[in-house]
Image (cartoon, grey):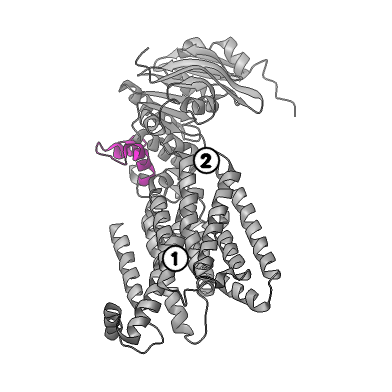
Amino acid sequence: MSGALLRLEGLGVRRGGRAVLEGVSLSVAPGEVLGLIGPNGAGKTTLLQAALGLVPATGTSSLASLTPGARARAAAYLPQAREIAWPLAVADVVALGRLPWGRLDAGGAVGRALAAMDLGPLAARPATALSGGEQARVLIARALAQEAPLILADEPVSGLDPAAQIRAMLVFAGRAAAGHAVVASVHDLGLAARHCTRLVLLHLGRVVADGPPAEVLTPDRVAAVFGLRGRLEDGPEGAVFTTLGLAGGGAAPPW
Amino acid sequence: MRGLLAALAGLVAVLFVASLLIGPAPAGPGESLRALATGEGAMGIVMREIRLPRALLAVLVGAALGLGGAAFQGWLRNPLAEPGLIGISPAAALGAVVALQTGLAALHPLVLPGAALAFAAVAGALILALAGRGGATLALILAGIAVSALAGALTSLALSLSPNPFAAAEAVFWMLGSLADRSMLHVWIAAPFVLAGAALVLRLGPALDALSLGEAAAAALGVRLGAVRLQLVVGTAAMVGAAVAVAGAVGFVGLVVPHLLRGAVGARPGRLLPASALGGAAMVLAADIAVRVIAPERDLKLGVLTALVGAPFFLDLIRRNRGAAG
């Protein structure tokens, strides 16, 4: 795959003497919306950071070998922690996405990103005065405004209202359809099954499954990795994943 | 934005001229400026040897403190940060006190500022070495606090080991900060360090803007965190070290000025840098004029005045911000 936007080979990260990520090899091609799924502590965040070269890692990543400036033009990163330090106007926060391009916004990327995340009416408001979900949308728009071929987003839709979650996933799908690609860690298996073209299931730092949602979200695997009973069906508008309950019966956990 | 910078530059220019015209020597504005231009007569000496260096130093010291404060606040994403936090100014003060206490300062006018600058440089190098490689912020702050505490303790030690009470009093007065009785020599000492440091720090604008989103996001936006930290510490040590070397400890400018101007630049840390440099110059010029107008006969200290005016003002600002936030 010479046109891949990201290539990882044998990527591993050790922290505190433990391997938190081990032997991850995958590549991301244009047109893909890759959902990174796995329970808490599976290594999703570490995988994204190691792919960018933000944490020391073994193995190779095509992004980590670039200079910081070239990497910022190749991939936009949306960290899990939503940090906006100063009462910057929403439009100014989104415009930070243009920094890797010397602040140039000839194509109107900032305006497009604001519109995509439905932030037009909030553009002049101080971002720190917005709700947590609104701030999350501002930061997604910031990553979009970077207009890099690849977006690496760490739990981009957690904390968003349901409509905004779907909107964000559709925007990602739109970027992919335009020849870009998105790698997003997602906890909501329903959203992942419906909106991702491909899922990578991480468990204890290793890739357990990698493929289309229907191949990854099998009942056995969902039970073994997430401890859940669930069902994946083909609905009239696409795949529907329904969570039925905890694996091993519906008993309440001891407390 | 251009309007704000132009307005601040205009304010600095007006205060600069006012600073040149105010003093005990009896001369009208026209006469004073003519004397400055020609350098003739007693008034020419007053203008060229006393008032001009004083006004120039106020600009240099104020710009260094304002810019240093804005840069540190942007870098740490904390409105309470200032260069004193990481021990640069306490170390420079220690150097000056050591020079005064050992009597070396009396040998040559360059000894005191030289010692202050040297100690600021040692502090900067020590902090960077202690903080280790990479761009970690917390390690640098902890190292800075340790250096700051050490410099403070050593300053107290030097004062308590003072050979005579006059030497101790001289050192204490020096630490209160003042621009009185400075010469063009002080300007030539401070200017290169302030200008070189400012050139380094002013270039950090885009990196500080990116850091508004946190360190990970900034790194992914192409910011080299380690290089930014190095540039910031070296630039600030040069600027603020030079400011303390020629003026003593002038407090609150680095804290208050960025805070005052943040709203006017839309809270953008990069744009705050040039604005705070001009704002700091204006504040120190105004304070130094006030020192001369309020008590012309007494040697009211500049650092005392900036803190006296700055602290209540700062408290009011905190009170109003609290109202806005909650």
- Quarter of the image where one finds residue A109: top left
On the same chain, marks 1 and 2? The answer is yes
Q: Nearer the viewer, mark 1 or mark 2?
A: 1
Query: According to the image, label 1 marks what residue?
Result: B61
Q: What mark, if any, has residue B135 been given in the picture? A: 2
Kind of residue at badge 2: Gly
Q: Residue at image x 27%, y 80%?
A: B38
Q: What mark, if any, has residue A14 been given in the picture? A: none
Instruction: Tell me the crowding category of disc 2: few under 14, some 14 to 19, or many 20 or more residues within 10 angstroms, Cα based.
Output: some
Q: Is residue A183 shown above or below B89? A: above
Q: Earlier in the sequence, mark 1 or mark 2?
A: 1
Instruction: Tell me the crowding category of disc 1: few under 14, some 14 to 19, or many 20 or more residues within 10 angstroms, Cα based.
Output: many
Q: CA distance from mark 1 to mark 2?
A: 28 Å
Which quadrant does the N terminus of chain A fall into?
top left
- Quarter of the image where one finds residue A56: top right
Q: Main secondary structure of the magenta part?
A: helix
SS at badge 1:
helix
SS at badge 2:
loop
Tag count: 2
Q: Residue at image x 32%, y 82%?
A: B44
Query: From where the camera sits, is residue A43 visible?
Result: yes
Q: Residue at image x 58%, y 49%?
A: B127
Q: Which residues are magenta?
A: A92-118
